[in-house]
């Protein structure tokens, strides 16, 4: 399965961006991570395939929303109230198990990353 992430770009603080991740085949647990320079890859949000159960990191809860369309094998991350500290490369990830762990090593499939820059 190949994942293609898109939608990154430049936003002002307080603004919004919507990221998309298109999968070439079915994946079950899907998630978004990000990695800022000099930092570890950080789990942001995840969504399961069967019941759309979601999980969020405290750093984005209430600001970011993950959603998916199983028929289109696509996952989105709606990002609102953006902050300069949200600046990072954002990655979508998938796995064949219907759960969304926070550890990056437990995902088998990764998109190429899309850069999000938030200016103050």
Image: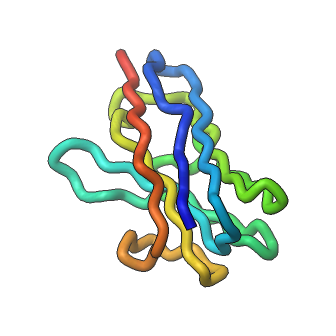
Viewer-side residue, 9 vs 3: 3
Quadrant where the C terminus sits is top left
Viewer-side residue, 95 vs 50: 95
| Residue 23, position as x, y percentages in the image | 63, 58
Q: Residue at x 41, y 32 (%)?
A: 116
Report the side of 108 relative to 15 (left or right): left
Question: Residue 77 appears in which quarter of the rendering?
Answer: top right
Report the side of 63 relative to 107 (left or right): right
Q: Is residue 2 above or below residue 83?
A: below
Q: Residue at x 39, y 50 (%)?
A: 34
Task: Please name the colour scheme applied to the rendered image.
Answer: rainbow
Q: Residue at x 64, y 60 (%)?
A: 24
| Residue 56, position as x, y percentages in the image | 56, 59
Report the side of 37 relative to 77 (left or right): left
Question: Residue 28 appears in which quarter of the rendering?
Answer: bottom right
Q: Looking at the image, how many numbered discs can be counted on the residues?
A: 0
Viewer-side residue, 119 vs 69: 69
């Amino acid at each position: 399965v190949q994942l293609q992430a898109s939608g990154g770009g430049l936003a002002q603080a307080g603004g919004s961006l919507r990221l998309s991740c298109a999968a070439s085949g079915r994946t079950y647990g899907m998630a978004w991570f990000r990695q800022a320079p000099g930092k570890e890859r950080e789990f942001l949000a995840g969504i399961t395939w069967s019941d759309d159960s979601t999980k969020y990191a405290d750093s984005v809860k209430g600001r970011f929303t993950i959603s998916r369309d199983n028929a289109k094998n696509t996952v989105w991350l709606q990002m609102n109230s953006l902050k300069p500290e949200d600046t990072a490369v954002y990655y979508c990830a998938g796995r064949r198990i219907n759960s969304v762990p926070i550890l990056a090593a437990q995902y088998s499939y990764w998109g190429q990353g899309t850069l999000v820059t938030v200016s103050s």
